[in-house]
Amino acid sequence: MIPISDSSHSCALPQQSLCLLRTQSSACPCYPARNLVEMSAPELRTRIEVLASEIRFQKQALTKLEHEKSLLERQLNAIVDPVARLPFETSSDIFSYLSLPVREGGSGRRGPQLLLNICKSWTSIALSTPTLWSAIRIDFPCAKLVHILPVWFQRAGNRPVSIFIHGDFTCLTYKVFSIVWRHGRLLKHLEISDDQLGYGGEIHYPELDILWDTIPEPLVCLETLNVHSSYGDRGFLSSQILQLLHLAPNIVECIFDMARLCEDTSAPLVIPTLRRLLFGRCDDAAVIKFLTLPALETLSVPMRVVVSGDLLSFFKRSAPPLRELVFGARYGSLGHRDIMDPGELRECLRLVPSLARFEIVRRADLHVITDLFLALADSPSLLPNLLSLVVHLDEEAPISDSFWTAVYHALLARTTQFQVVQFDTYYSLPASKMPAPDIMAAFRELGADGTQVCINSQTTDTRPSYSFSS
């Protein structure tokens, strides 16, 4: 324990100082009990100087006492606080678990901020752990974050930061976006999500401006960009999204989830590092017409991109080493513009011979799917590396024996190639639309040879799902 005082450095106060600290109803007893009015000007100045000197002395003594008290408290914490007894690296690792995305909706009192209010030891550990400040969630409206964000980035040091921007984008605080873009060199993961639903008959904001005449710093660390919208009448400017991608030389993944991109003036963009491009629950992906992605390995696009011819042009420009391809969003209904020509599908697929997994999520016309299986049976050069094929069938479609026969011939021709062929429906298929007994027996034989054939439904009812595998 550190002593408060010792014989050589005593904190004992002189009698005159003790007199000054005592509360008296009249003048201090260490001075003559005279009316201050009777003192001359030189006497008053002398007394003021004495008091000022005593005040300085008392402040110094108080500062020393507070310092020694703080040292004693730290020693006590080291005895009773288990975190304080741990090595700094261990405590820092424990605190880092609080670096998960936290809501900072204006108050700034959650997540890592809480550690600053426990004790000086915890505060020191928190402020010395940059990874603790490597993630923040911003929820609009959030005017108070204008003051918190710069401090947050400062505490993160030069560590990469994940930013999650959510909320009502009709209440944007553009200064918040400006601060984010000024620290663009630190961004590793960026998620922008307009979560607010519509307002009935009120004024809408069809185009969301997230740059606001700000030129972001180069996003040299950015690896993933996720753009989401919950309201179909508002959209992000495609030129701004493409500008962000242009500034990200190391971008690997880009996700547009229910995000409508308003077409404006956009220049073609080549991104040599992007490997995953996903349009989840989107009915449109027109931005793909501006992109060339020579390293793309995974792509999920709505069916409309195939019908419009944009996907075919994209494959011709990019020649990507595609490994996984998903057609169609899982939500929404098919429109007349989604009617696909079988020849268009075959032409697209011939441009991606490296494809290992293919899934049709939206329920395409049965004749398109039938044509695909016939082409797989007759043309070995079509998708020569395909291992997994998943097709979502419409249980109301006129599924007949001719369809299942085409499936069987395709599987038979690719026995040594296919690993999984799966058919999904929302409701179970009635018995009249299931494969005939001889086809079912053939599927079992293929399963024994190593090709897994599955017929599943998403709902639970009395009809079983079927899986034929070894």
Image (spheres, grey):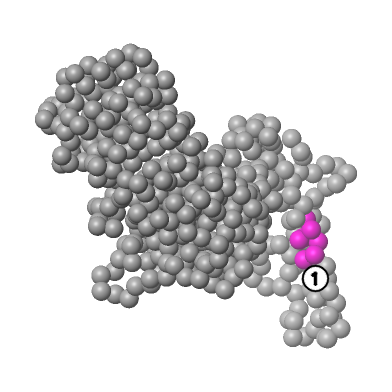
Residue of label 1? 52
Q: Amino acid at mark 1?
A: Ala
What x and y, as percent, mark residue 166?
44, 57
Direction right: furthest residue: 8
Give the answer, above or below, for where 219 lies relative to 174.
above
* Residue name at image x 84 percent, y 74 percent: 49
Which residues are drawn in magenta?
A: 55-61
Q: Nearer the viewer, residue 16 or 144?
A: 144
Give the quarter of the image for residue 196.
bottom left
Q: Nearer the viewer, residue 48 or 331?
A: 331
What x and y, as percent, mark residue 152?
61, 56
What x and y, as percent, mark residue 185?
66, 56
Quadrant in the picture for the C terminus: top left
Relative placement, left or right, of 131 versus 367 is right
Using the rendered image of the protein, determine whether residue 406 is visible from the camera's viewpoint. Answer: yes
* Residue name at image x 61 percent, y 55 percent: 248
What x and y, as percent, mark residue 318?
54, 50
Relative placement, left or right, of 431 versus 236 is left
Give the answer, above or below, for where 229 lies relative to 80.
below
